[in-house]
Image: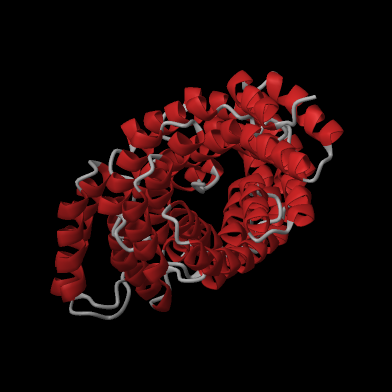
Amino acid sequence: MKRFTNNLILLFFASALFFALADSTSAQNKRDMRKAKSLVSQGDKLFNKREYKGAIDKYTEAISLVDNYAYAHFWKGNAYYYLKQYDVALDEINIAQTQGYTPLIDLYRIRWYLNYTQGKYDDAISDLNNALQIEPNNVAFKAGLGDVYYAKKSYRDALNIYNEIVDQLPNNGNTYYSIANSYYNLGETELQKTAAEKAVQNGTQFMSDAYFLIGKAYQKNRKYAEAASNYERSINVKRDNYDTYRSLSDVYRNLNRFKDAVQITKKALEEYPRDGNLYTDLAWYYSLADQHAEAVGAAEIAISLLPDKYQAYTYLCRGYNDIKEYQKAIAACNDALKLNPEDGETNFYIGRAYEFSGKTDTAQKFYKKALAGLIEYTQRYPDFADGYYLLGNAYFSNGMKAKAIESYIKSLEFSPDFKKARYNLGYVYIQNGDLSSAEAQYNALLGLDKVLAARLKEAMPKK
């Protein structure tokens, strides 16, 4: 998710531009000093007109005559700041300090931000703390300090600062957003949600991202309908919010709304037409929606964009399996395994392709590798329904029906409407002779997919 600097720092650079001629800095040649002062005066006028390049030229000429000229270095640094040449700006401001520029508060006011842009976070913190010693109640300095701690990933320190600001400005939506973002990074979901809701209520400038954080909190708590609603609001506010598109499509998957997952991913591709990860997602959602030819097409585009990433090859393999082109499936899976040899999902799909090609001994070798890989995968991602679904498939393919049942049940805990998991669970119950449990899955499937429910019914022994 994008990180925005709290807009309170803009207060630092909103003051009117006015200048006074610099005092004499040393006993320089009087003629050079008069000429340097004249050049600085010209630079100031150009600066006030926002002609920053011209101002830099004049300040540079002045410095060439009188090197120990803190004022000229300081405003030359400011001109570079407005041209967004932050590294050069920082060099000039540092020279101004070594040459004794005053007042220091003005130097701290710009230099902390320049240090921040260059990733010199400890130097930025030092400048802000020095500034706060001079102006202890300056909210803009506090906001900057919170943002620097956030950038440094010192989220607890950032929170402490943001909460001080809220005490001073209780209706500042942007600060509530910063608080929510900090809680998000700390994994404190309920506090994240509460702060993001306050950000929305108080009109944060980052409304789309605040809705995203609310949606994330609901998603983590498996309240998928509420998560989807907030993600939809996020996109309505800001159409190019990349993280929201991917999170919303994932929530639609959890809700068994695979066609909606397809559609929202296609909308994301309108904003990011060359994004290989989105095409990879699209291939997966097409497969889940039983649009197998489209899954193959999306996977092929994903591979063209991300030829060194294994996942698109894996989904291409899955798509070819689903349209019964098993030799092509084997080739695609082998391409994936070159990039990630231990991937459980890929090993499962290539095992399936060999099984359906009549090579059961080869299939079993891959099914065993799939089992090991998928066990490891679910340990790394313990909240992912599809991982447990695939693990259930691997257990079943290895003849471990009880373990398969456990995995399908686990998958359904995270995605109760996952119809393929319900079908497979019902099928394994039939294999085990547990017809009452199979009947329960059939009844659940009736409300999700009548065609799949009918297939499960057909697999049951006739009474």
| Nearer to the camera, 82 or 271 | 271
Q: Is residue 310 above or below residue 428?
A: below
Quarter of the image that includes the C terminus: top right
Q: Is residue 166 above or below residue 125?
A: above
| Nearer to the camera, 261 or 190 | 261
Number of numbered callouts drawn: 0
Colour scheme of the rendered structure? secondary structure
Residue 271 x %, y %: 34, 34
| Nearer to the camera, 345 or 425 | 425
Q: Is residue 249 left or right of residue 34?
A: right
Residue 132 x %, y %: 64, 59
Q: In this view, does 1 lie above or below 115?
A: above
Q: Is residue 241 visible?
A: no
**Residue at 33% across, 67% down:** 87
| Quadrant of residue 191 within the rendered picture | top right
**Residue at 78% across, 41% down:** 429
Residue 157 x %, y %: 71, 61
**Residue at 20% across, 59% down:** 56
| Quadrant of residue 214 within the rendered picture | top right
Q: Is residue 299 left or right of residue 189?
A: left
Q: In this view, does 195 lie to the left or right of 240?
A: right
Q: Can residue 372 be seen in this view?
A: yes
Residue 68 x %, y %: 29, 77
| Quadrant of residue 228 within the rendered picture | top right
| Nearer to the camera, 408 or 72 | 408
The residue at the far front in this view is: 463
Q: Is residue 27 left or right of residue 398?
A: left
